[in-house]
Image (tube, rainbow, N blue to C red):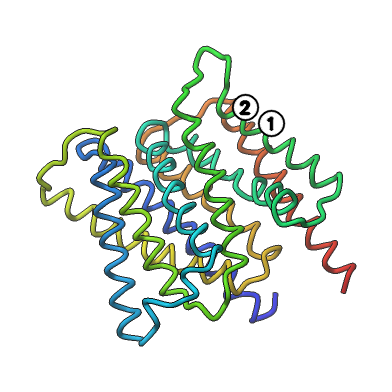
Amino acid sequence: MKNSEFQPVLFMVGSMALFSLEDFFIKLLSSTMPASQIMLIMGLSGSIIFLFFAIVSKQPVFSRDLLDKHVITRTLADLFGALFFVGAIVLTPLSSASAILQGTPLAITAGAAIFLGETVGIRRWLAVLIGFFGIILIVKPGLADFNPLSLLAVIAVICLSARDLATRAIKTTLPTLTISVYGFGAMAAAGMLAIPFYGDFIWLSFREITILMVGIASGVAAYYLLVGATRYGDASLVAPFRYSRLVFALLLSILILGERPDLLTWLGALIVVFSGYFIVLRERNIKNVKK
């Protein structure tokens, strides 16, 4: 791997590890805090942190480029992605929510073909369909242990894939710090929208403040690394390393939270990962042939 390729890959793996930590801390906090309060505090804190760094580094906080339809689409997708995925983390096992999230690259491939007019061959479409079958195994509709709330993670996949598709189209002249300010602002807005669906806000204990601080730091660092990897790394190179998030999430959920994913969840997760990985390899081979 060339040095120019190594940095985006490192960004992606680091981002996935930190996102898994953020998810884990949200799960811990949800035992005593409403999800709406968690999202509001994390979103506002992250937005303020990125705003500070943007001002210090003299990056534009306000820009005409922010009115671009791709930026607006990305922010709205971020808002609803946070709303539904945090709900999935709080209300369903972390292991299954994280496994379903791995379907994002599959949804990106389908979305790129439908909305961006990208050419997707029969093999990649077949991989997408097989991957979606894997998600069905994880969700288990129609079976006795089907949890309707797991559909929150499925909706989050759709929103986050829309976010990543919009990110591709954003001008590279718009700084990552600026995008991140509004991304975390969207999470805060998601928290406000979620207030009617969760319990009353609580006064924070020292434990909750500590976990929040570590979770916010993890989320801020993860978000910045993800935007950098997505914008400056070749998509076919960095995309496979998204699946490292599932490894980190499973380790945390099994070793610390004591979750025990069933056979269908393991099988579905493997199908989703292998389908996504096949798509990435196929896209890379096609690009190499065109060069």
Q: Secondary structure at mark 1?
A: helix
Residue type at tag 2: Leu
Q: Quadrant of the N terminus?
A: bottom right
Residue 34 in the figure: left or right of residue 232: left
The kind of secondary structure element at disc 2 is helix
Front-most of 240 and 154?
154
| Picture residue at 48% right of the left edge, 61% below the top | 72
Residue identifier under label 2: 137
Find residue 220 and report its horizontal and vertical position in percent: 36, 64
Which residue is the site of mark 1?
133
Residues at circles 1 and 2 in contact by the CB criterion of under 8 Å? yes
Where residue 238 appears, as percent x and y from the top left, is: 63, 64
In-image side of 87 versus 156 (left or right):
left
State the image quarter where residue 289 is shown.
Answer: bottom right
Q: Residue, x 59% and y 33% (percent of image)?
A: 266
Dot 1 amino acid type: Phe
Q: Residue at x 62, y 67 (%)?
A: 169
**Separation of disc 1 and disc 2 at Cα?**
6 Å
Q: Residues within 10 Å of mark 1 (few under 14, many from 20)?
A: some
